[in-house]
Image (spheres, helix red, strand yellow):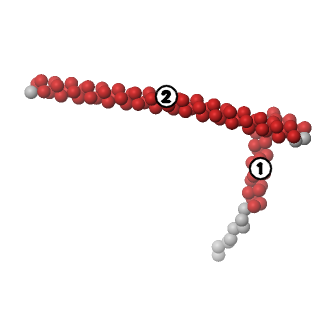
Amino acid sequence: MSQATDKAREDLTTWAEDGASRVSEGFEKLKGDATDAAATMQKDVGHGLSQYNAKAREIANKVSAGIGEKVARYPWVAISIGLGIGFLLGVLLRPARKLLM
């Protein structure tokens, strides 16, 4: 009986250690995959921003000198102007609401 208990305890300990080892390996793999995905996303976002800045500079060069220089130096100005125009168009083109009475 004592040997069976010791054997069962040893098997249970081995099973728990193997399970913990597998979970640890899974977390390490997941961590590696997440790191790779983050690096790829950072690279893609950086590339997209570079393209956006190049396009903004190209458009800014076509616009009058004062506005063009500001947009080239401060891309957020172009974004703000675009958002403002978008909101204005949204308000103007919004369908009329019916009043319920």
Identify the residue position indicated by label 2 in the image: 32
Of all residues, the one furthest to the bottom in this rendering is 101
Task: Describe residue 89's horizontal placement relative to residue 25 as left or right.
Answer: right
Residue at point 82%, 40% (across, down): 59
Q: Which residue is mark 1?
A: 84
Where is 47 relative to 88, above or below?
above
Position of the N terminus, as image quadrant, is: top left
First reached walking from the N terminus: tag 2 or tag 1: 2
Q: Position of residue 77 (x, y in %)?
A: 79, 40
Where residue 92 sits, quadrant-wise, is bottom right
**Label 1 element class:** helix
Question: Could you say which quadrant of the image residue 54 lies in?
Answer: top right
Q: Residue at x 41, y 30 (%)?
A: 26
Q: Which mark is on residue 62?
A: none
89 or 60, which is in the foreground?
Answer: 60
Tag 1: amino acid: Gly
User: What residue is rendered at 51% in x and 32% in y?
Assistant: 34
Type of the residue with mark 2 = Gly
Question: What quarter of the picture does the C terminus occupy?
Answer: bottom right
Q: Check disc 2 and report its element: helix, strand or loop.
A: helix
Q: Is residue 68 left or right of residue 25?
A: right
Q: Which quadrant holds residue 63? A: top right
Q: Tell me where residue 98 appears, x and y as whole percent.
A: 68, 71
